[in-house]
Image: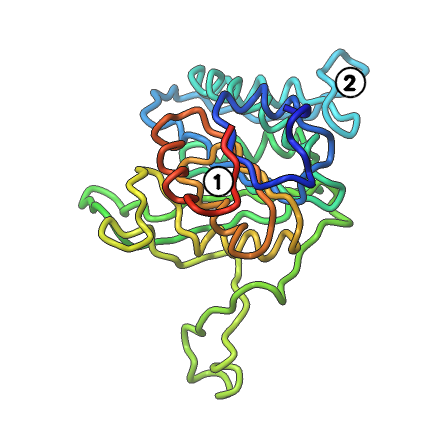
Amino acid sequence: MAEYWDPAGPNLVVRGDNLPVLRGLPDGAFTLIYLDPPFNTGRARRAERVRGVPVDPAEGGRLGFRGRGYAVTREMTLAYDDRFGDYWDFLEPRLIEAWRLLADDGTLYLHLDYREVHYAKVLLDALFGPDCFINEIIWAYDFGSRTRKRWPTKHDNILVYAKDPAGYHFDAAAVDREPYMAPGLVTPEKAALGKLPTDTWWHTIVSPTGKERTGYPTQKPVGVLRRIVQASSRPGDWVLDAFAGSGTTGAAAQELDRRFLLIDENSEALEVMQRRFAGRSVEFR
Protein backbone atom coordinates (compact mmCIF):
# COMPACT_ATOMS: atom_id res chain seq x y z
CA MET A 1 0.00 0.00 0.00
CA ALA A 2 2.77 2.42 0.92
CA GLU A 3 4.24 1.86 -2.55
CA TYR A 4 1.31 3.53 -4.29
CA TRP A 5 -0.35 5.72 -1.62
CA ASP A 6 1.02 9.19 -2.13
CA PRO A 7 0.17 11.89 0.43
CA ALA A 8 0.54 14.37 -2.42
CA GLY A 9 -1.70 12.31 -4.66
CA PRO A 10 -5.47 12.17 -5.22
CA ASN A 11 -8.21 11.09 -2.86
CA LEU A 12 -8.21 7.31 -2.82
CA VAL A 13 -10.69 4.44 -2.39
CA VAL A 14 -9.15 1.00 -1.90
CA ARG A 15 -11.02 -2.28 -2.20
CA GLY A 16 -9.80 -5.04 0.11
CA ASP A 17 -9.35 -6.27 3.66
CA ASN A 18 -8.49 -3.14 5.62
CA LEU A 19 -5.93 -4.75 7.95
CA PRO A 20 -3.14 -5.42 5.40
CA VAL A 21 -3.87 -2.05 3.80
CA LEU A 22 -3.52 -0.31 7.15
CA ARG A 23 -0.30 -2.17 7.91
CA GLY A 24 1.16 -0.88 4.65
CA LEU A 25 0.59 2.79 5.46
CA PRO A 26 3.26 5.05 7.03
CA ASP A 27 3.25 6.11 10.68
CA GLY A 28 1.47 9.33 11.62
CA ALA A 29 -0.10 9.89 8.20
CA PHE A 30 -3.62 10.92 9.29
CA THR A 31 -4.94 13.74 11.42
CA LEU A 32 -8.36 12.10 11.70
CA ILE A 33 -9.38 8.44 11.67
CA TYR A 34 -13.05 7.47 11.74
CA LEU A 35 -13.96 3.80 12.21
CA ASP A 36 -17.51 2.51 11.86
CA PRO A 37 -17.07 -1.27 12.18
CA PRO A 38 -19.83 -3.89 12.23
CA PHE A 39 -21.79 -3.67 15.49
CA ASN A 40 -21.62 -7.40 16.34
CA THR A 41 -25.35 -7.86 16.89
CA GLY A 42 -27.21 -10.95 18.05
CA ARG A 43 -24.67 -12.34 20.50
CA ALA A 44 -25.51 -14.71 23.36
CA ARG A 45 -24.47 -13.60 26.85
CA ARG A 46 -23.44 -15.32 30.06
CA ALA A 47 -24.35 -13.93 33.48
CA GLU A 48 -20.82 -13.41 34.78
CA ARG A 49 -19.63 -10.16 36.33
CA VAL A 50 -15.97 -9.30 35.93
CA ARG A 51 -13.77 -6.28 36.52
CA GLY A 52 -10.66 -5.35 34.61
CA VAL A 53 -7.47 -4.66 36.57
CA PRO A 54 -4.16 -3.10 35.49
CA VAL A 55 -1.18 -5.29 34.71
CA ASP A 56 2.46 -4.70 35.52
CA PRO A 57 4.46 -5.64 32.39
CA ALA A 58 7.28 -6.78 34.68
CA GLU A 59 4.95 -9.52 35.94
CA GLY A 60 4.47 -10.98 32.49
CA GLY A 61 1.52 -8.92 31.30
CA ARG A 62 1.25 -7.96 27.67
CA LEU A 63 3.00 -4.68 26.97
CA GLY A 64 0.62 -2.04 25.66
CA PHE A 65 1.09 1.47 24.32
CA ARG A 66 3.00 3.87 26.60
CA GLY A 67 4.54 0.89 28.37
CA ARG A 68 1.29 -0.23 30.01
CA GLY A 69 0.26 -3.84 30.26
CA TYR A 70 -3.29 -4.78 29.46
CA ALA A 71 -3.40 -8.58 29.32
CA VAL A 72 -5.53 -9.05 32.41
CA THR A 73 -7.84 -6.16 31.51
CA ARG A 74 -8.41 -7.72 28.11
CA GLU A 75 -8.81 -11.30 29.36
CA MET A 76 -11.22 -10.37 32.14
CA THR A 77 -13.32 -8.18 29.87
CA LEU A 78 -13.55 -10.92 27.27
CA ALA A 79 -14.54 -13.41 29.97
CA TYR A 80 -17.95 -11.77 30.16
CA ASP A 81 -18.85 -13.14 26.76
CA ASP A 82 -16.71 -15.63 24.89
CA ARG A 83 -18.16 -14.57 21.53
CA PHE A 84 -16.96 -11.02 22.17
CA GLY A 85 -13.44 -12.43 22.03
CA ASP A 86 -13.90 -13.19 18.34
CA TYR A 87 -15.15 -9.67 17.71
CA TRP A 88 -12.30 -8.04 19.58
CA ASP A 89 -9.76 -10.31 17.91
CA PHE A 90 -11.08 -8.79 14.68
CA LEU A 91 -11.19 -5.17 15.87
CA GLU A 92 -8.17 -4.92 18.17
CA PRO A 93 -5.40 -5.17 15.53
CA ARG A 94 -7.18 -2.53 13.46
CA LEU A 95 -7.28 -0.18 16.45
CA ILE A 96 -3.58 -0.80 17.07
CA GLU A 97 -2.91 0.25 13.47
CA ALA A 98 -5.14 3.29 13.91
CA TRP A 99 -3.04 4.41 16.89
CA ARG A 100 0.13 4.01 14.81
CA LEU A 101 -1.32 5.87 11.83
CA LEU A 102 -2.53 8.87 13.81
CA ALA A 103 -0.45 12.03 13.58
CA ASP A 104 0.84 13.44 16.86
CA ASP A 105 -2.12 15.82 16.91
CA GLY A 106 -4.52 13.20 15.56
CA THR A 107 -7.86 11.92 16.83
CA LEU A 108 -9.69 8.60 16.55
CA TYR A 109 -13.50 8.41 16.39
CA LEU A 110 -14.82 4.87 16.97
CA HIS A 111 -18.52 4.55 16.10
CA LEU A 112 -20.34 1.72 17.90
CA ASP A 113 -23.64 1.12 19.69
CA TYR A 114 -24.75 -0.08 23.10
CA ARG A 115 -23.78 -3.71 22.36
CA GLU A 116 -20.01 -3.09 22.30
CA VAL A 117 -19.24 0.40 23.52
CA HIS A 118 -18.65 -0.54 27.17
CA TYR A 119 -16.18 -3.28 26.19
CA ALA A 120 -14.46 -0.99 23.71
CA LYS A 121 -14.09 1.82 26.27
CA VAL A 122 -12.23 -0.44 28.73
CA LEU A 123 -9.98 -1.87 26.06
CA LEU A 124 -9.25 1.46 24.36
CA ASP A 125 -8.28 2.89 27.73
CA ALA A 126 -5.78 0.05 27.97
CA LEU A 127 -4.51 0.47 24.39
CA PHE A 128 -4.31 4.27 24.17
CA GLY A 129 -4.15 5.11 27.87
CA PRO A 130 -7.13 6.44 29.87
CA ASP A 131 -5.78 9.98 29.68
CA CYS A 132 -6.23 9.83 25.88
CA PHE A 133 -10.01 9.51 26.20
CA ILE A 134 -11.62 12.79 25.13
CA ASN A 135 -15.37 12.19 24.75
CA GLU A 136 -18.18 9.73 24.38
CA ILE A 137 -20.52 11.32 21.85
CA ILE A 138 -24.14 10.24 21.84
CA TRP A 139 -25.68 10.49 18.40
CA ALA A 140 -29.44 10.51 19.06
CA TYR A 141 -32.07 10.12 16.36
CA ASP A 142 -35.82 9.55 16.25
CA PHE A 143 -36.66 7.47 13.23
CA GLY A 144 -37.40 3.83 12.42
CA SER A 145 -39.12 0.93 14.16
CA ARG A 146 -40.56 1.05 17.67
CA THR A 147 -41.15 -1.41 20.49
CA ARG A 148 -43.57 -1.41 23.42
CA LYS A 149 -41.53 -3.88 25.48
CA ARG A 150 -38.72 -1.48 26.45
CA TRP A 151 -37.45 2.03 25.79
CA PRO A 152 -36.78 2.14 22.04
CA THR A 153 -33.06 2.28 21.25
CA LYS A 154 -32.47 5.46 19.28
CA HIS A 155 -28.82 6.37 19.66
CA ASP A 156 -25.28 5.33 18.70
CA ASN A 157 -22.08 5.87 20.69
CA ILE A 158 -18.91 7.44 19.28
CA LEU A 159 -15.77 7.14 21.40
CA VAL A 160 -13.15 9.86 20.85
CA TYR A 161 -9.47 9.25 21.69
CA ALA A 162 -6.47 11.47 21.01
CA LYS A 163 -2.96 10.31 20.15
CA ASP A 164 -1.63 13.00 22.50
CA PRO A 165 -4.18 14.33 25.01
CA ALA A 166 -2.06 17.44 25.52
CA GLY A 167 -1.70 18.30 21.83
CA TYR A 168 -4.56 17.09 19.65
CA HIS A 169 -6.24 19.30 17.08
CA PHE A 170 -9.75 20.47 17.95
CA ASP A 171 -11.35 23.56 16.42
CA ALA A 172 -14.72 24.34 18.02
CA ALA A 173 -14.99 27.56 16.02
CA ALA A 174 -15.03 25.59 12.75
CA VAL A 175 -18.06 23.50 13.72
CA ASP A 176 -21.51 24.38 12.40
CA ARG A 177 -23.63 25.76 15.22
CA GLU A 178 -27.06 24.40 16.09
CA PRO A 179 -30.28 26.05 17.31
CA TYR A 180 -30.88 26.58 21.00
CA MET A 181 -33.56 24.24 22.36
CA ALA A 182 -34.98 27.16 24.35
CA PRO A 183 -34.09 30.27 22.31
CA GLY A 184 -36.27 32.45 24.50
CA LEU A 185 -33.83 31.97 27.38
CA VAL A 186 -30.93 33.65 25.56
CA THR A 187 -30.48 37.00 23.87
CA PRO A 188 -31.74 37.44 20.29
CA GLU A 189 -28.13 37.77 19.16
CA LYS A 190 -27.19 34.42 20.72
CA ALA A 191 -30.32 32.77 19.36
CA ALA A 192 -29.48 33.97 15.85
CA LEU A 193 -25.88 32.74 16.15
CA GLY A 194 -26.81 29.35 17.57
CA LYS A 195 -24.84 27.31 20.10
CA LEU A 196 -21.85 25.02 19.88
CA PRO A 197 -22.81 21.33 19.97
CA THR A 198 -22.30 19.33 23.16
CA ASP A 199 -21.48 15.62 23.40
CA THR A 200 -25.12 14.79 22.57
CA TRP A 201 -25.90 15.21 18.88
CA TRP A 202 -29.51 15.24 17.73
CA HIS A 203 -29.46 14.38 14.04
CA THR A 204 -31.88 12.31 11.99
CA ILE A 205 -30.71 9.18 10.20
CA VAL A 206 -30.58 9.19 6.42
CA SER A 207 -34.18 9.10 5.27
CA PRO A 208 -35.10 6.10 3.09
CA THR A 209 -36.71 8.54 0.65
CA GLY A 210 -34.28 11.46 1.05
CA LYS A 211 -31.97 12.88 -1.63
CA GLU A 212 -28.92 11.93 0.44
CA ARG A 213 -29.80 8.23 0.36
CA THR A 214 -27.38 6.03 -1.61
CA GLY A 215 -29.12 2.71 -0.97
CA TYR A 216 -26.34 1.38 1.28
CA PRO A 217 -27.98 -0.14 4.39
CA THR A 218 -25.69 1.34 7.07
CA GLN A 219 -25.18 4.76 5.50
CA LYS A 220 -24.41 7.53 8.01
CA PRO A 221 -25.59 11.13 7.53
CA VAL A 222 -23.19 13.65 6.05
CA GLY A 223 -24.16 16.04 8.86
CA VAL A 224 -22.67 13.76 11.54
CA LEU A 225 -19.41 13.22 9.65
CA ARG A 226 -19.21 16.87 8.68
CA ARG A 227 -19.11 17.86 12.34
CA ILE A 228 -16.36 15.33 13.08
CA VAL A 229 -14.25 16.46 10.12
CA GLN A 230 -14.74 20.15 10.92
CA ALA A 231 -13.65 19.78 14.54
CA SER A 232 -10.74 17.37 14.24
CA SER A 233 -8.97 18.20 10.98
CA ARG A 234 -7.84 21.19 8.96
CA PRO A 235 -8.15 21.92 5.23
CA GLY A 236 -5.57 19.80 3.45
CA ASP A 237 -5.30 17.18 6.21
CA TRP A 238 -5.68 13.48 5.43
CA VAL A 239 -8.72 11.65 6.81
CA LEU A 240 -8.92 7.84 6.97
CA ASP A 241 -12.03 5.64 7.08
CA ALA A 242 -11.20 1.92 7.10
CA PHE A 243 -14.84 0.74 7.06
CA ALA A 244 -15.97 3.16 4.39
CA GLY A 245 -19.38 1.71 3.50
CA SER A 246 -21.24 4.28 1.43
CA GLY A 247 -18.33 6.75 1.53
CA THR A 248 -19.94 9.41 3.74
CA THR A 249 -16.62 10.24 5.41
CA GLY A 250 -15.09 10.95 2.02
CA ALA A 251 -18.08 13.05 0.96
CA ALA A 252 -17.80 15.20 4.08
CA ALA A 253 -14.01 15.45 3.78
CA GLN A 254 -14.16 16.51 0.13
CA GLU A 255 -16.83 19.09 0.86
CA LEU A 256 -14.56 20.60 3.52
CA ASP A 257 -11.36 20.52 1.42
CA ARG A 258 -9.74 17.61 3.27
CA ARG A 259 -7.95 14.66 1.65
CA PHE A 260 -9.27 11.15 2.23
CA LEU A 261 -8.41 7.49 2.02
CA LEU A 262 -11.35 5.06 2.19
CA ILE A 263 -11.11 1.27 2.49
CA ASP A 264 -13.81 -1.39 2.13
CA GLU A 265 -13.90 -4.95 0.83
CA ASN A 266 -17.66 -5.07 0.20
CA SER A 267 -18.44 -5.01 -3.53
CA GLU A 268 -21.77 -3.25 -2.87
CA ALA A 269 -19.96 -0.50 -0.96
CA LEU A 270 -17.51 -0.01 -3.82
CA GLU A 271 -20.35 0.26 -6.33
CA VAL A 272 -22.10 2.86 -4.17
CA MET A 273 -18.91 4.90 -3.80
CA GLN A 274 -18.18 4.75 -7.51
CA ARG A 275 -21.58 6.28 -8.18
CA ARG A 276 -21.24 8.77 -5.34
CA PHE A 277 -17.83 10.06 -6.41
CA ALA A 278 -18.40 9.89 -10.17
CA GLY A 279 -16.88 12.92 -11.86
CA ARG A 280 -14.88 13.91 -8.79
CA SER A 281 -11.15 13.74 -8.18
CA VAL A 282 -11.14 10.28 -6.59
CA GLU A 283 -9.02 7.28 -7.60
CA PHE A 284 -10.22 3.68 -7.12
CA ARG A 285 -7.80 0.81 -6.58
Between 32 and 38, the one nearer to me in the picture? 32
Q: Is residue 137 left or right of residue 146?
A: right
Amino acid carrying mark 1 in the image: His
Q: Secondary structure at mark 1?
A: strand
What residue is disc 1 on?
Answer: 111
Amino acid carrying mark 2 in the image: Pro
Residue 148, above or below 118: below
Q: Which mark is residue 228?
A: none
- Please identify, in this view, whether the residue under mark 2 or under mark 1 is nearer the observer: 1
Displayed quadrant of residue 21 = top right
Residue 145, above or below 51: below
- Location of residue 155 in the rendering, given as x and y in whole percent from the top left corner: 38, 48
- Location of residue 70 in the rendering, given as x and y in whole percent from the top left corner: 67, 22
- Location of residue 94 in the rendering, given as x and y in whole percent from the top left corner: 58, 25
Between 62 and 270, the one nearer to me in the picture? 270
Task: Single out the residue that lies furthest toward the right.
Answer: 58
Task: Single out the residue that lies furthest toward the front.
Answer: 279
